[in-house]
């Protein structure tokens, strides 16, 4: 699994090119990006783009409805944005977020004990911490299977595949044991509500060399 350390150093705004226009996702913390990764649906990134208030040109929804932007181009652009802020490929980010969501009492608890602040740190740093916690609690053979899982794509971006999530969960539970009973947690946003996280104004992240 290749990781870009720059994604973990600060909050970055992300520019998305669609139909000759540039849309910007503000610099948002891990608490805003985590539900997107848990959902495994790149289209959730659209909820993070502020609505156009100046009326200058069509918004993303209008561009999609008019056919100005194809579904494939849209998904590819959104996946690129996710990978840029996550600092790793879409699949690895999805697996790490899914594991944290499923084993939240352990992983979330250890991250809280270490002082990790979801509303201040970048999502890349959150994924780094999740990876460190999981790796530290697996024996060598299980850790190798964990690495293999991160490097074996199970999710096709843009297509809802419950089987992909189930495969990742089943594989992780076989390594770490089933999630604790009686504890429920959900990082997913409501169906219609936009994230309430207040954007932090930061410059767009520079392109990697």
Image (tube, rainbow, N blue to C red):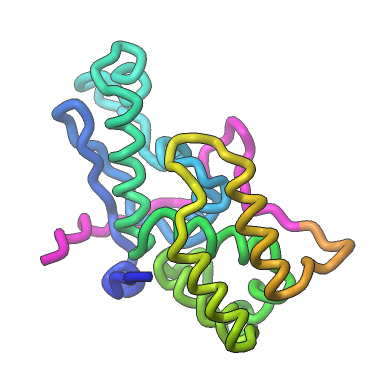
For the point 35% across and 45% down, the residue is: 79
* Left or right: where 153 falls relative to 164: left
Give the position of the N terminus as an image quadrant.
bottom left
Q: Residue furthest left?
A: 209
Residue at image x 36%, y 14%? Answer: 65
How far from the left and from the top, in percent, is residue 115? 56, 82
**Of residues 113 and 207, the one drawn nearer to the viewer in this rendering:** 207
Say above or below: 47 vs 137: above
What is the x, y in percent for residue 191? 61, 33
Q: Which residues are magenta?
A: 185-209
Looking at the image, residue 10 lies above or below residue 200: below
Left or right of residue 204: residue 49: right
Give the camera-side residue of 154 and 114.
154
Q: Is residue 118 above or below residue 111?
A: above
Q: Is residue 11 magenta?
A: no
Q: Residue furthest top?
A: 66
Q: Is residue 24 above or below residue 91?
A: above
- Identity of the residue drawn at 43% across and 42% down: 157
Residue shown at 65%/67% (left/top)?
172
Q: State the image coordinates of residue 25 (x, y, percent, origin top left).
A: 32, 45
Q: Residue 55: percent from the left, percent from the top? A: 25, 20
- Name the image quarter holding the C terminus: bottom left
Question: Residue 193 magenta-drawn?
Answer: yes
Q: Quadrant of residue 99?
A: bottom right
Q: Nearer the viewer, residue 129 or 114?
A: 129
Q: Quadrant of residue 208?
A: bottom left
**Magenta span main SS:** loop
């Amino acid at each position: 699994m290749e990781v870009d350390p720059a994604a973990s150093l600060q909050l970055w705004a992300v520019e998305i090119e669609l139909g000759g226009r540039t849309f910007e996702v503000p610099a948002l913390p891990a608490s805003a990006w985590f539900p997107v990764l848990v959902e495994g649906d790149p289209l959730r990134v659209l909820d993070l783009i502020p609505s156009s208030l100046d009326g200058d040109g069509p918004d993303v929804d209008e561009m999609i409805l008019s056919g100005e932007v194809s579904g494939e181009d849209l998904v590819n652009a959104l996946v690129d944005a996710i990978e840029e802020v996550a600092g790793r490929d879409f699949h690895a980010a999805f697996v790490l977020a899914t594991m944290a969501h499923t084993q939240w009492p352990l992983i979330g608890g250890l991250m809280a004990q270490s002082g990790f602040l979801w509303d201040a740190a970048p999502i890349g740093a959150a994924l780094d911490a999740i990876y460190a916690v999981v790796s530290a609690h697996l024996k060598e053979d299980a850790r190798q299977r964990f690495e293999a899982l991160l490097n074996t794509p199970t999710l096709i971006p843009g297509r809802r595949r419950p089987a992909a999530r189930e495969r990742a969960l089943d594989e992780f539970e076989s390594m770490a044991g089933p999630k604790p009973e009686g504890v429920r947690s959900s990082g997913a946003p409501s169906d219609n509500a936009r994230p309430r996280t207040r954007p932090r104004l930061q410059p767009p992240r520079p392109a990697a060399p």
